């Protein structure tokens, strides 16, 4: 943990345990205390590469779902979840000009995935 993000660990130890000089502790005690830090502590988030935890993304995801329902495709604001996480939104939907186009694509996909 020290090698990954020393500053985050020092801050977490000070905030959680009021330990301001971790070098005074035996290594085993320091390891036990560090492993007992909460999931949303600075060092745990850094170790896992998280910017946000799942509960923090629930409201932005609700916003994104509501914007799909409320706004036209052209007027829709950018995805709040993508803005927060830095992810780029990939276009995963395909539009069809008619019901026949949809049925043709559906049949193609059924044949493609049933003959695997």
Image: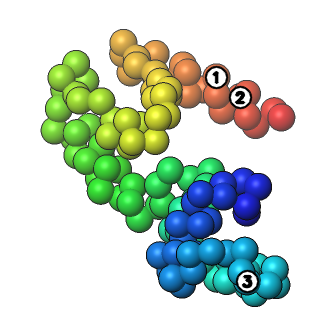
Q: Name the residue beneath numbered marker 1.
A: 108
Residue 43 to residue 99: above or below: below
The residue at the point 53 percent across, 66 percent down is 11
Residue drawn at the location 46% of the way across and 41% of the way down: 85
Judge by depth and name the residue closer to the eye, 91 or 102.
Answer: 91
User: Residue 78, which numbered label?
Assistant: none
State if disc 1 and disc 2 touch (CB < 8 Å).
yes
Q: Nearer the viewer, residue 27 or 4?
A: 27
Q: Work out how far the residue at label 2 is from the one at label 1, CA to CA, in angstroms.
A: 5 Å
User: If the image is split into quadrants, where does the N terminus sit?
Assistant: bottom right
Q: Name which residue lies at 35% across and 50% down.
A: 61
On residue 111, the disc is 2
Q: Which residue lies at the image location 49% right of the left edge and 34% below the top edge?
A: 87
Q: Residues within 10 Å of mark 2 (few under 14, many from 20)?
A: few
Q: Residues within 10 Å of mark 3 (few under 14, many from 20)?
A: few
Query: Which residue in the structure is indicated by mark 3?
Result: 25
């Amino acid at each position: 943990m020290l090698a990954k993000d020393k500053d985050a660990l020092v801050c977490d130890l000070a905030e959680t345990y009021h330990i301001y000089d971790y070098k005074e502790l035996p290594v085993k005690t320091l390891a036990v205390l560090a492993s007992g830090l909460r999931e949303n502590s600075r060092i745990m988030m850094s170790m896992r590469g998280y910017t946000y935890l799942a509960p923090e993304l629930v409201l932005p995801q609700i916003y994104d779902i509501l914007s799909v329902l409320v706004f036209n495709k052209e007027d829709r604001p950018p995805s709040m979840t993508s803005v927060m996480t830095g992810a780029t939104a990939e276009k995963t939907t395909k539009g069809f000009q008619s019901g026949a186009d949809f049925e043709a694509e559906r049949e193609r996909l059924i044949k493609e995935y049933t003959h695997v």
